[in-house]
Amino acid sequence: GVHVIEPGLGYLACGMVGAGRLADPEKIVAETLAVLGVSQDLAGETVLITAGPTYEPIDPVRFLGNSSSGKMGYAIAEAAIRRGAKVVLVTGPTALTPPSAAEVVQVETAEQMRNAVMEHFAEASIVIKTAAVADYTVKQRSDQKIKRKGEMTLELTPTADILAELGARRVKPSQIIIGFAAETEHGIAHAREKLRNKKVDAIVMNDVSQAGIGFGSERNAATVVTTHEEIDIPEMPKFAMAQRVLEIALKLRTPQKSEVASR
Ligand code: CTP
């Protein structure tokens, strides 16, 4: 039952040339995954993933943020790498360590996230936006720490909707764009509306009113809404859900049987 990874050829420590070098780490990983039956169905693809929250500064020490941990996006990044993809991970502030093979772009604000996503959009064949992007940013950031002085009002201004911009500016029709939506009520209806308005291929809808899943948790459950169907993903670890989301992304690119038949 032992699978042997043969040594590499080349110069050896003893001064001779031949078989005896430690196999390349990439080869060891690829062969291990092959033995484990992990398919390399994303080889040659670039997957652009956003993860985590965004922080909108109020003053030098305060910001508007949200409870996104980044775990779902990081799990998708890891899963895509294992399936052979090149991954660009645009991440807001999180406590997580990104997969070492990912190209990581650290951002804080929604605007920085937008710029990083736009920079990498053209090279991506699949875009998955798990990030919980702030919908509003502070209109006038204070350069000095704001002092307590009774009641105060913060004026906010809307941020750019990155996902909608991607949907409107698809570089090629084969690009698959998937958004996430955390909802507390009328989840499917809201997800369907986002699918239509943002012109994307799927919305992964999490019902965050359910205990034990979603933000900060190791587990998640979702309904994936596409133009053709609603796919229920029961509660499972985020890494398993990441694999399901990638499978759905690949399936979305395969023409639907009914469409093929009608051509
Ligand atoms: N999103 C984005 N840019 C924004 C806000 C959201 O790209 N400024 C993306 C998120 O990354 C996510 C999807 O849009 O993939 C849905 O996010 P959500 O906050 O649920 O969407 P909104 O359109 O802001 O709707 P809501 O009014 O429910 O907040």
Image: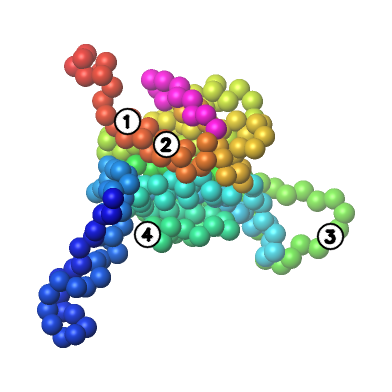
Which image quarter: residue 37?
A: top left
In the rendered structure, which amino acid carries the disc numbered 2? Val
Q: Which one is closest to the eye, mark 2 or mark 3?
A: 2
Instruction: Quickly name the residue at label 3.
Output: 148
Instruction: Quickly name the residue at label 2.
Output: 245
Q: Does label 2 or label 1 sit earlier along the sequence?
A: 2
Q: How far apart are marks 3 and 1 (CA)?
A: 54 Å
Residue 203 in the magenta stretch? The answer is: no
How crowded pointer 3 is (Cα within 10 Å; few <14, some 14-19, many 20+) is rated as: few
Camera-nearest residue between 130 and 75: 75
Magenta residues, start to end: 226-235
Quadrant of the rendering where the C terminus is positioned: top left
Q: Does label 2 or label 3 sit earlier along the sequence?
A: 3
Instruction: Quickly name the residue at label 4.
Output: 101
Q: How far apart are marks 4 and 2 (CA)?
A: 20 Å
In the rendered structure, which amino acid carries the disc numbered 1? Lys
Q: Does label 4 or label 2 sit earlier along the sequence?
A: 4
